[in-house]
Image (cartoon, rainbow, N blue to C red):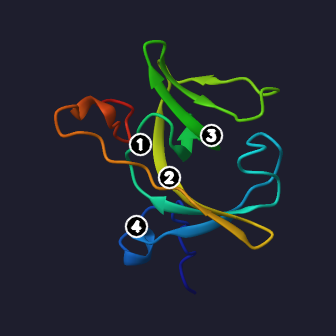
Amino acid sequence: MSEPATERPPLEGPGCSLHEPFALQVLGDEMEPELPDRCVIIVEPTDRCRDGMFVFVEVEGVRWLRQYRHDADGERLVACNPLYPQIDLKGLEWQVLGVVIQRNIRRRVKHYRYTAEPEADPGGMTDATGSA
């Protein structure tokens, strides 16, 4: 009798494919109009993000697609659709799983190129634990 396979959480493990971009389909209107329902996005795995990036994150065990904002008001995740509340990250356990680098809406492709932060301002990047 063989032992049951142990389930590995997604986006973790030794495989090199975990470092390759992957596709997701947006379900819901939380990110409309920028990332509308049923559009396909390409996510580049990373554990860092900067203000303004569209991110795939896990907050307290729940995965979200949102825009990351970091300013004088603190760190938060914002839906493009104003009907949905922002998620204040202060005091929460969260980690970045990846950043959106492309979207496809009915074969119309848009690439997201996030400009590099100046070397003199290392505070612009946030690691997976939410600290600089």
Q: Nearer the viewer, residue 99 or 14?
A: 99
Label 3 neighbourhood size at 10 Å, few (<14), some (14-19), many (20+)?
A: many
- Left or right side of 90 for 65: right
Q: Which residue is mark 3?
A: 66
Q: Are marks 4 and 3 in contact (CB under 8 Å)?
A: no
Element at badge 4? Answer: loop
Instruction: Name the kind of residue labelled 1 in the image.
Output: Cys
Q: Are marks 4 and 1 in contact (CB under 8 Å)?
A: no
Asked whether residue 63 is in view, the answer is: no
Q: Nearer the viewer, mark 4 or mark 3?
A: 3
Badge 2 or badge 1: first in the primary sequence: 1
Asked whether residue 28 is in view, the answer is: yes
Q: Which residue is mark 2?
A: 99
Label number found at residue 92: none
Element at badge 3? Answer: strand
Badge 2 or badge 3: first in the primary sequence: 3
Q: CA distance from mark 4 to mark 3?
A: 25 Å
Label number found at residue 13: 4
Label 1 neighbourhood size at 10 Å, few (<14), some (14-19), many (20+)?
A: many
Q: Residue furthest top?
A: 73
Q: Which residue is mark 1?
A: 49
Q: Nearer the viewer, residue 27 or 16?
A: 27
Q: Are marks 3 and 1 in contact (CB under 8 Å)?
A: no
Image quadrant where one finds the C terminus:
top left
Q: Residue furthest bottom?
A: 1
Q: Are marks 2 and 1 in contact (CB under 8 Å)?
A: yes
